[in-house]
Image (cartoon, rainbow, N blue to C red):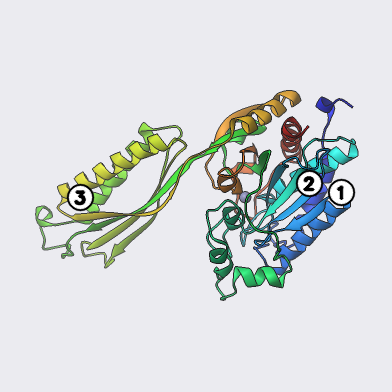
Amino acid sequence: MQHDQLRIDGARLWDRLMSMAEIGATAKGGCNRQALTDEDKMGRDLFCEWSRNAGCSIRFDQMGNIFARRAGSDFDASPVIAGSHLDTQPTGGKFDGVYGVLAALEVIETLNDNDVETQHPVEAIVWTNEEGARFAPAMIGSGVYSGEFELEFAHDIQDKSGLTLGGELQRIGYAGDNPCAPSAVQAAFEAHIEQGPILEAQDKTIGVVTGVQGMRWFDINLVGEPVHAGPTPMEMRKDPIRALQVIIGEVYKIADRFAPQSRATFGDLNLTPGSRNTVPENVTLAVDIRNPDDDKLDQMEEQMMAAIEKAASDAGVACSVDTIWRSPAVNFNDDCINAVRTGVETLGIDAIEMVSGAGHDSVYLSRVAPTSMIFVPCRDGISHNEAEDAQPEHLEAGTNVLLHAILERAL
Ligand SMILES: [Zn+2]
């Protein structure tokens, strides 16, 4: 068979997604399979069983990342890898992460079914604790692999009951001996549900993901004077809310100025003392700004800082800004993006190019390996939710794109 004609088995993929979803299934149709729980172990065991049956050799590293390898004709060639995560949020869905893992395995099955020999080995990978729900921070398996976190730091992280990540890895039997460190990789792909509404809104089947938004988190602190709501005339107040309303308006204007790719979100607001007939003394506002272009994000941040300073000084209140987190924008690898584009063209699928608004294992992986991602639509853009849903034909199409992107780099 011509390689262009190769197609994955959508029914097998769907059956496996549904079998995996039974592990940690919740009453509302979602999944609770948090990292390194008994359920996560069962999910991992099932993946390893399927992979062994598909003739893969399996190894896992010191972080419990699982690598299922289909050998290539050139034993020493660097592998083309694809994968994602099997862990879920406490009230997570059936597709977030799991899809990317089982799509990679489905590609290997398809290569087997059609006796396709690739020069490069092909690996399906499970990254440990992507969600960060049980052990924070998120993306810790791929993060240690890529050098973002130290192994000891990761092993010492505790869950709410004081159990450590390292101890739980031992307990479920997935603490490997292989060093958790990058090795040569020919190309890395991750198929994932979009977790947003754009593909569905534009009626497209595939998102060719060219990068990930840069994200910055700040706490804006405003300090005024707590005075009585009645006796104190307006012009004699140092009211931090007067500054706050200007800051919020200005930051929304900044987001509009850099539209459509920019984002600005105020997710948390604290007022103290928090009494309805007293001007607050302290206001803390959490701000999350995003843009796929770090230069534009710099400009957004600069304009935001200027607006904060002016609003505070106009209102006669003190202000300070704490930086909580900065995650640089990611530009995926051109060869990998092109491989996905070629896959889309070979299959004649309706696709758009987009950037990811959410973090993924591929963010860290892209620092040490040529990487890109493939998105498929999910219903109403809902994710991290038991109602998360995706259409079998979209999942099949995304896996076919993954197959042809892998062929593009592995043959
Ligand atoms: Zn995910």
Q: In the rendered view of the protein, which quadrant contains the N terminus? A: top right
Mark 2 is on which residue type?
A: Leu
* Residue drawn 84% across the image and 43% down it: 109
Q: Is residue 261 above or below residue 145?
A: above
The numbered mark, 2 or 1, whose residue comes first in the sequence reads 1
Circle 3 crowding by C-alpha within 10 Å: few under 14, some 14–19, many from 20: many
Residue at the spot of label 3: 312
Secondary structure at numbered mark 2:
helix
Residue at the spot of label 1: 54
Circle 2 crowding by C-alpha within 10 Å: few under 14, some 14–19, many from 20: many
Secondary structure at numbered mark 3:
helix
Distance (Cα) linking label 1 and label 3 = 63 Å
Horizontal side of 321 relative to 186 (left or right) equals left
Mark 1 is on which residue type?
A: Ala
Are dots 2 and 3 in contact, CB under 8 Å?
no
- The image's mark for residue 105 is 2
Residue 258 at x, y percent in the picture: 39, 33
Horizontal side of 303 relative to 161 (left or right) equals left
Are dots 2 and 1 in contact, CB under 8 Å?
yes
Residue 342 at x, y percent in the picture: 69, 26
The numbered mark, 1 or 3, whose residue comes first in the sequence reads 1
